[in-house]
Amino acid sequence: MSGTANFKLKFMGWVGCICLIPGIAFAGLTTAQRKSQFERALGLVISAVTPDMPVDERDRLIEAYMNGKSNKGLAVQDVYRGYIVSVLHEDEEAVGDRALEACQMRFAKPCALVAINDEIATDGQLEYKDMPRLHYAGDFDLSQIPTIRLDTRNRADLQRYFRASEPKAIAIHPWGELFISWGTADAQQTVLNKCNNFGRDKQNGPCFLYAINTKVVLPERITRPK
């Protein structure tokens, strides 16, 4: 049996397990019960998608997701067998695309959505989506920046970036953290240093240069000054 066929059987087995969880399909559960059922379902999904993941690593991932602040999403990359948690989005509608963008930025390959807030985001078949903003390489355009939240998009320094004096640069982290520098010769190094040292766990990958002057360079996946 091929690896793909074997995976599909395992995944459909997970779907059957979900259906057997007592009460998961019924309304009227308390918040605590719903949370418990969702956490259990999430564990089943992760076990099916990445069966080789050590139990303690899976438990840490589930804990990190459960403790993440809404609106949040969980995405997976099948080749690297890796996950990313994307949190604190302003509304639920924004979560799916941003989580997929964050995951693809981290792993350089399309990802699939596993969960949004306290709901499993798949009915039994993962959908790996190539996110177009990860490939954009034209002139700086606010609407083309992936992963970032609305409050970041509305920041004054980002709004002024296009007309700011050169040299200038922007660095971005998969979590949607954005750093900007302009008017200094070492703008690229400055933003990369700020981004890579902003104090969060670096397990979700390095920072990348998003723009050099007004040219978007994200598809080049540059992690050092060019």
Image (cartoon, rainbow, N blue to C red):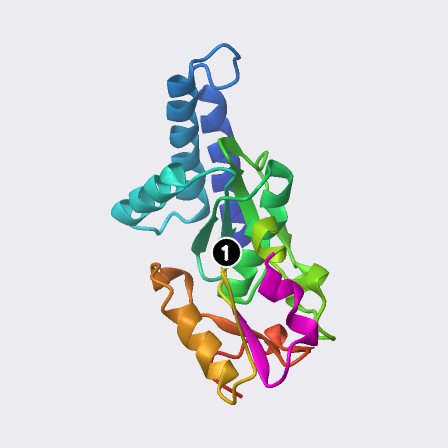
69 in relation to 137, above or below: above
**x, y percentage for residue 142?**
69, 63
Q: At x 59% / y 78%, what residue is drawn? A: 220
Alpha-carbon neighbours of circle 1 within 10 Å: few (<14), some, or many (≥20)? some
Closer to the camera in the image, 53 or 103: 103
* Residue 44 in which image quadrant: top left
Q: Residue furthest top?
A: 28
Residue type at tag 1: Asp
**x, y percentage for residue 212?**
61, 81
Q: At x 42% / y 19%, what residue is drawn? A: 31
**Do we see residue 149 in this rendering?**
no
39 in relation to 5, above or below: above
Q: At x 54% / y 44%, what residue is drawn? A: 89
Q: Give the range drawn in magenta.
A: 155-171
* Residue 148 in which image quadrant: bottom right
Q: At x 52% / y 31%, what residue is drawn? A: 119
- Residue on which the image places disc 1: 78
- Horizontal side, residue 85 vs residue 105: left or right: left
- Horizontal side, residue 198 vs residue 111: left or right: left
